[in-house]
Amino acid sequence: MISQAVLEKNRGSSMIRQMFEQGQVLRQQYGADNVYDFSLGNPDLPVSARLTDALIASAREARHGYMNNAGYPELRALIAGREQRRSGRPVTSQGVVMTVGAAGALNIILKSICNPGDEIIILKPYFSEYLRYCENSGAQAVPVDCDPASFLPLTSALEQALSPQTKAIIINNPNNPAGVVYSAAFYEQTAALLEQLQQPVYVISDEPYAQIVYDGTTVPSLLRYFSNGIVAYSWSKSLSIPGERIGYVAVSEDCADYEDLCQALVFCNRSLGFVNAPAIWQQTLLKLGDFKPDLSVYQRRRDLLYHLLTGLGWDCYKPEGAFYLFPRSLEPNDQAFAKAAAEEHILLVPGRGFGMPGHVRLAYCVDEAVIRRAETAFGRLTARYRA
Ligand SMILES: Cc1ncc(COP(=O)(O)O)c(C=O)c1O
């Protein structure tokens, strides 16, 4: 009785769920301390006391009513100010819409801009949900190959992917799963490429990891480099609150069809059933102001896991951001490799789900102790292939 399309798509997208179930079974069998689960991008850092205090204060105020579908004007003004300072472009509260996380942001953006048959360019390796989000808006995702050493898109592949149907490019910065931070030079180069086209192309940056960066790296402001830029941000990762669902979309007044786009974003927030972003989290963010949690622990974990794997001879890019490593699997079949890893109680995600078979993703949202304990298991896994 249910939708055939949903049935089929759901069947095809169960890799991470299978991994999750496999983890449960392994933990029951061998004990939680003997399973090394690097499969989920679920931040494990405790939320700061400041955040909890702001949340409790918001709960006491008991403001639970409906609001403007775009969110509280005072919070939108605060975010607009930040985006304007970062980009040097005019951004006002009209150009900011509070959303149900980055997922909500991306869905309202795509719904707002896509006509049936429009193409959305996504860069390999990509967050696999982009495929679903494009389908939700009747658009076709067009993946672009990258240089496997730097994970930067191949210019020739990007040029080839651009067509009269191209409506937008999604740039996930920093990238999940590779941990690459796309530089200002890449933005400049891409902006020059888009200028040669007949039609305006929106450039969407998906930035839930923008605060998780290493060695002094910064994520360039998308709006600075692209007049048709659309930022999708979320606090899921930086505040360790992915279950709470809070983010925003921001556009500058320089954006093509600015007035219509702003109205469309608000309309889609409502019509897709989000209605508005959670009230209590908007109030909490207003109270937090410019508070930034200490995220340096991720850099220590990155170093630990990166040195562990490269020390064993794995071919692995050193991430500049996010909390994932994306090494080559030790055999070409990444799914078979993930199975072999699970036999050593190591859970990781095959790269094919990100458009790059032959790789695996490891999320280091785990305690440093787990990484240390996993050392012997990684050694055994590696030895299988050396033999
Ligand atoms: C690249 C990327 N985009 C979007 C999301 C969704 O984020 P949110 O939880 O804020 O909806 C995730 C979550 O893992 C992600 O990795």
Image (cartoon, rainbow, N blue to C red):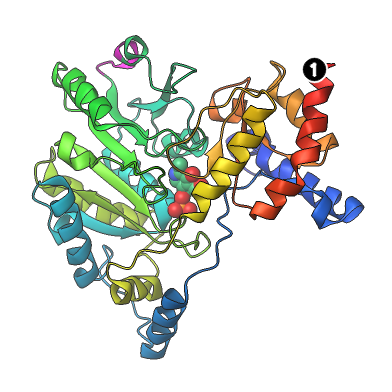
Up/down of 53 relative to 336, above or below? below
Q: Position of residue 376 (x, y in %)?
A: 80, 39
Q: Position of residue 25 (x, y in %)?
A: 85, 50
Q: Residue at x 34, y 48 (%)?
A: 108
Q: Where, by quadrant of the figure, is residue 137 drawn?
A: top left
Q: Residue at x 86, y 56 (%)?
A: 31
Describe the element under mark 1 as helix, strand or loop.
helix
Magenta segment boundaries in residue numbering: 159-164
Q: Quadrant of the N terminus?
A: top right
Q: Position of residue 364 (x, y in %)?
A: 60, 46
- Asked whether 70 falls inside the magenta stretch, the response is no
Q: Where, by quadrant of the figure, is residue 354 drawn?
A: top right
Q: Where, by quadrant of the figure, is residue 312 drawn?
A: top right
Q: Going by the image, does 332 lie left or right of 65?
A: right
Residue 350 shows in the view: no
Up/down of 50 relative to 106, above or below? below
Q: Residue at x 34, y 15 (%)?
A: 161
Q: Residue at x 41, y 64 (%)?
A: 293
Q: Quadrant of the C terminus?
A: top right
Q: Mark 1 highlights which residue?
A: 386
- Camera-nearest residue between 159 and 138: 159
Rate crowding at label 1 as few (under 14), some (14 to 19) or many (20 or more) other CA atoms within 10 Å: few
Residue 345 shows in the view: yes
Up/down of 293 relative to 378, above or below? below
